[in-house]
Amino acid sequence: MISSAETSPLSSRAAVIMLEGRLPMFEAPAVSALGLKDGQVVRPSIEVRDGQLQLVLQGLLIPLPPQLRLVAGERPPWQVRLDANGRATLVLVSESSAAAIASGDASAPLPEAQQAASRLQQLALRPSSMAGLTALMQPGVLTTLLQAASQPEVAAQIAQLMRQLPQTSQLTPEVLRRALRQGGWTQEASLARGDSVSARDGPDTKSLLRTLLSEWAQPPASVRALLQDSLDDIESRQLQAVVDPSAGRELSLAMILPFADAEPVQLRWSQARDGQAGSEGTPSPWVVDMHTRSSVFGEVWLRTRISRGTQVELVMWAERAEVVAQARAAGPSLIAWLDEAGLRMAALQVVHGAPPPGIEPAGPSSGDLGRLVDLRA
């Protein structure tokens, strides 16, 4: 651990992330600077600073989540939870749990209700970028896992997942529908309703990840962390779709669309519910956001609005001038292709630069791997 004097410069850095007023999360550099360890119990003091309650941890000021009913002068125990990316979340624990950890019984299980609450808190705090799942779906990663799997049944599960990844040249509406069904959410909903799941779709990604985590005996620590991180990304987006402030006003779904020969694409589509319908009683438009990053095209964002079932408005942002020029030149071909499909391009705009806030980002770049889906599609 480091002293308060050594950490005092940290108070001016943006080392703490607060998502919608929930628990504080520290990025990896701050975790290292503060000397935080997984499972460690810390007792920051609660003080009033600038008229607001703050946690004070080794000189670092942390805004107190407003939903926690704590008062100045208290020093409740918080347990440090590290994720696979080195980020730390502070989770409130009971005095009895803190005492068990302090006595050396760090492995003592938390009460079942507290375990569930901690799990939900961690999932709710995960960033929306789905960086773990994006890393897993990079070209070549599953091949590396397949080569590392010594158990035939584990290798078969990884091979099954690889067979479900389409080539970019094979992207069709049916392939996209199948990818959605294999994401885990729709199959779970079907099972909850008592409906049968089509065998032709194959097992969903979430089920395969759970199987690999349970059946792979002693995988490398980095592999287990990557698999767990990917599973957490899926379940986090499921949870956040429920607890998001727009839930109830908006139907929203996000997923990673992986490819066998390119970097994955992050997708998010949404539609305002009936109470938010458009003018004259028409259904609200569907909004589809896409984002990808590659060495060929750089970063590209797409936002598509589909209204009245056939009217399409498309805005594209790209950071490379040559990609912008290429997209603008391909505009007439895209309009003609949509017309053949029974759709009408109501507006098309290609912007040089990054989009405004609100367009879904993707995970960190992985280098030179990947290319964008054919712009003509």
Image (cartoon, grey):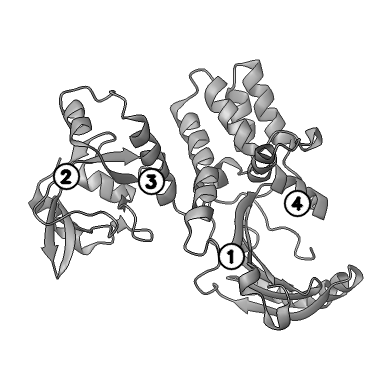
Q: Position of residue 92 (x, y in %)?
A: 26, 43
Q: Quadrant of residue 156?
A: top right
Separation (CA) of disc 3 from disc 2 = 17 Å
Q: Helix, strand, or loop for circle 3?
A: helix
Q: Which mark is residue 76?
A: 2
Q: Earlier in the sequence, mark 3 or mark 2?
A: 2
- Location of mark 4 (residue): 176
Q: Nearer the viewer, mark 1 or mark 4?
A: 1
Q: Nearer the viewer, mark 4 or mark 3?
A: 3
Q: Helix, strand, or loop for circle 2?
A: loop
Specify the amino acid type for callout 4.
Answer: Leu
In the foreground, 228 or 67: 67
Q: Is residue 349 above or below residue 55?
A: below
- Location of mark 1 (residue): 250
Q: Which mark is residue 121?
A: 3
Q: Which mark is residue 212?
A: none
Q: Helix, strand, or loop for circle 1?
A: strand
Q: Position of residue 264 (x, y in %)?
A: 63, 50
Q: Earlier in the sequence, mark 4 or mark 3?
A: 3
Residue 261 visible to an observer of this rendering: no
Specify the amino acid type for callout 1.
Answer: Glu
Q: Is residue 295 above or below residue 138?
A: below
Assign the C terminus to one quadrant of the image: bottom right
Q: Earlier in the sequence, mark 2 or mark 4?
A: 2
Q: Helix, strand, or loop for circle 4?
A: helix
Q: Is residue 24 above or below residue 108?
A: below
Q: Are marks 3 and 2 in contact (CB under 8 Å)?
A: no
Specify the amino acid type for callout 2.
Answer: Pro
